[in-house]
Image (spheres, grey):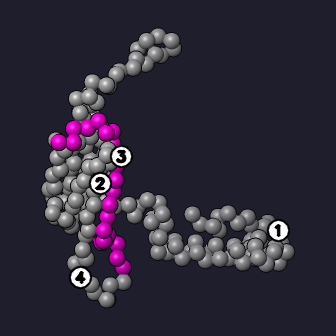
């Protein structure tokens, strides 16, 4: 967001922003100018994307059905041997490392992700740990975690009433 959009413009003979008026505190004036400097700098380099959640990698879809959980992660550029999948005390962990292809000193822009990653997902402990399966194909990791028989039996359908009538 551009900080300049927050600065009210005066109407009348001066046509200057509040940040440029001399009757404003010099500290407030400096604060606004520094904010504008950082806003302009981050806007030019598209840095705000890092704070909006775009830096989370790998991207995943987590689906729950009546019988299982399914976690699908897109991890392009890796082999299945480079990914570690762990399940401990109800937490699924995906981790690995993507190595750089070359270390050129002439590179000026790097948009692709390199380095270690780890994602964790807290799942219900009532899963069948012995039948968890992980497959990796074409840069996509799919982890299937079946629910245990106990979890399937404990599921109870709750009727939803509409205007006082059972549904």
Q: Residues within 10 Å of mark 4 (few under 14, many from 20)?
A: few
Q: Are marks 2 and 4 in contact (CB under 8 Å)?
A: no
Residue at 34% across / 76% down in the picture?
110
Residue on which the image places disc 3: 122
Comparing marks 4 and 3, which lies closer to the viewer? 3
Q: Which residue is drawn at 16% across and 41% down?
A: 131
Q: Is mark 4 on a helix, strand or loop?
A: loop
Q: Residue 12's mark?
A: 1
Q: How far apart are marks 3 and 1 (CA)?
A: 59 Å
Q: Do the numbered discs 3 and 2 sit on residues whose CB atoms are within 8 Å?
A: no
Is 114 magenta? The answer is yes
N-term-proximal mark, 3 vs 1: 1
Boundaries of the magenta span: 109-130
For marks 2 and 4, give the CA distance.
28 Å
Label 4 and label 3: CA atoms lie apart by 36 Å
Judged left or right of residue 130, residue 26 is right
Q: Which of marks 4 and 1 is in front?
A: 4
Q: Pick the quarter of the image with the N terminus.
A: bottom right
Instruction: Give the image location of residue 39, x and y in percent.
Output: 58, 72
Contact (Cβ within 8 Å) of mark 2 with mark 1: no
Question: Would you identify the image quadrant in which residue 28 lies?
Answer: bottom right
Q: Which of 60 and 150 is in front in this view?
A: 150
Crowding near the residue tagged with mark 1, few <14, some 14–19, many ≥20 C-alpha atoms within 10 Å:
few
Residue beneath disc 2: 93
In the picture, measured across the screen, residue 27 lies left or right of residue 133, that is right
Residue position for label 4: 102
Work out how far the residue at label 2 is from the one at label 1, CA to CA, in angstroms. 61 Å
Under circle 2, the secondary element is strand
Q: Reply above or below: 93 against 147.
A: below
């Amino acid at each position: 967001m551009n900080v300049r959009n927050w600065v009210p413009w005066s109407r009348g003979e001066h046509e200057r922003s509040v940040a440029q008026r001399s009757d404003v505190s010099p500290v407030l004036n400096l604060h606004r100018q520094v904010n504008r400097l950082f806003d302009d700098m981050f806007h030019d380099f598209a840095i705000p994307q890092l704070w909006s959640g775009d830096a989370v990698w790998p991207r995943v879809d987590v689906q729950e059905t009546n019988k299982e959980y399914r976690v699908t992660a897109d991890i392009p550029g890796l082999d299945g041997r480079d990914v570690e999948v762990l399940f401990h005390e109800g937490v699924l962990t995906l981790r690995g490392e993507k190595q750089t292809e070359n270390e050129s000193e002439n590179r000026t822009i790097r948009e692709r992700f390199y380095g270690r990653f780890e994602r964790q997902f807290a799942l219900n402990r009532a899963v069948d740990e012995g039948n968890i399966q992980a497959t990796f194909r074409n840069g996509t990791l799919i982890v299937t975690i079946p629910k245990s028989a106990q979890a399937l039996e404990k599921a109870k359908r709750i009727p939803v009433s509409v205007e006082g009538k059972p549904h």
